[in-house]
Image (cartoon, helix red, strand yellow):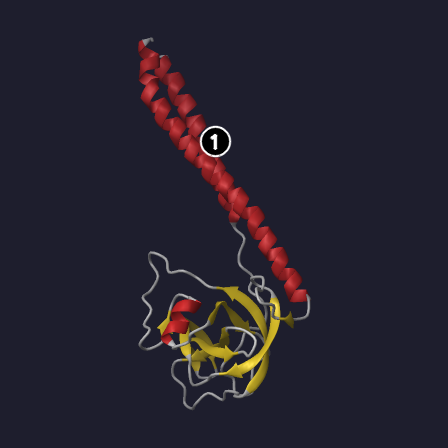
Amino acid sequence: MSRGLRRLLWPGVMAAVMLAVLLGLGTWQVERLHWKRGVLAQIARAEAAPAVPMPAAPVPFSKVEVTGHLRDDLSAYYGAEVRDTPAGPQLGTQLIVPLEREDGDDVLVDRGWVPNARPRALALSSGEVTLEGYVRPGDTPGLFSASDSPTTRQFYTLDPAAIGAALGLQRIAPFVLVAMGPPPPERYPDPARHLPQPPNNHLSYAITWYGLAVALAVIFVLWARKALTT
């Protein structure tokens, strides 16, 4: 092996490894792009269709309706969000209330956003109700997730099992029903108006990773040509 080729050996190995990583990341983003398009198409179909009676194992982000008894005496809170209100910007959270059903597990219902500072008690319905909303799968805490507080029933990870345990529920569905509807006369809780529209930036991510791979290949070729001629 000539001296010039020996100079290219380890830089070439390192460049090949980096190139494989960049191409792998770009391909992963292409796969995520197709997956996200499928999710968005599913959400669009559910948005256009009427709500259906909730089956035993509902599809995530499907629009359903369910009947049961709301337990407003057992409430929890999820997340933190600032919204504009008639009183100005206020910090608030999502109100989580269990719905007891005669023919299945209890379902946690995200009834909507409520401000942390409230001049009066929330006007909540009680007894048997029929709610319409969409099915949101449960989450698992990430490495940088805020810590939940089961004692105060304030949660930052939407984990139905953990929230149900804090509320003393024995049987809880592994998803949350996000209530949908117009703004109520008493304003709070303020339910969702439509299904979520998650962003789809995977194409730009894929172009970025593939672009870096091309740039790496060009830079290495130019460097190698210079190294072989000196």
Query: Which residue position holds label 1?
Result: 214
* Residue 40 location, quadrant: bottom right
Camera-side residue: 171 or 198? 171
Camera-side residue: 121 or 101? 101
**Disc 1 residue type (three-letter):** Val
Q: Position of residue 46 (x, y in %)?
A: 64, 64
Quick one: which residue is furthest to the right in this view? 49
Q: Position of residue 180 (x, y in %)?
A: 57, 74
Q: Position of residue 108 (x, y in %)?
A: 48, 74
Q: Residues within 10 Å of mark 1 (few under 14, many from 20)?
A: some
Image label count: 1
Q: Position of residue 7 (x, y in %)?
A: 31, 17
Residue 230 visible in the displayed image: no
Q: Quadrant of the N terminus?
A: top left
**Relative height, residue 147 to residue 7 (above, below):** below
Q: Quadrant of the C terminus?
A: top left
Q: Residue at x 61, y 61 (%)?
A: 43
Residue 40 visible in the displayed image: yes
Q: Residue at x 58, y 64 (%)?
A: 58
Q: Residue at x 45, y 26 (%)?
A: 218
Q: Secondary structure at mark 1?
A: helix
**Relative height, residue 218 to residue 144 (above, below):** above
Quick one: which residue is furthest to the bottom in this view? 120
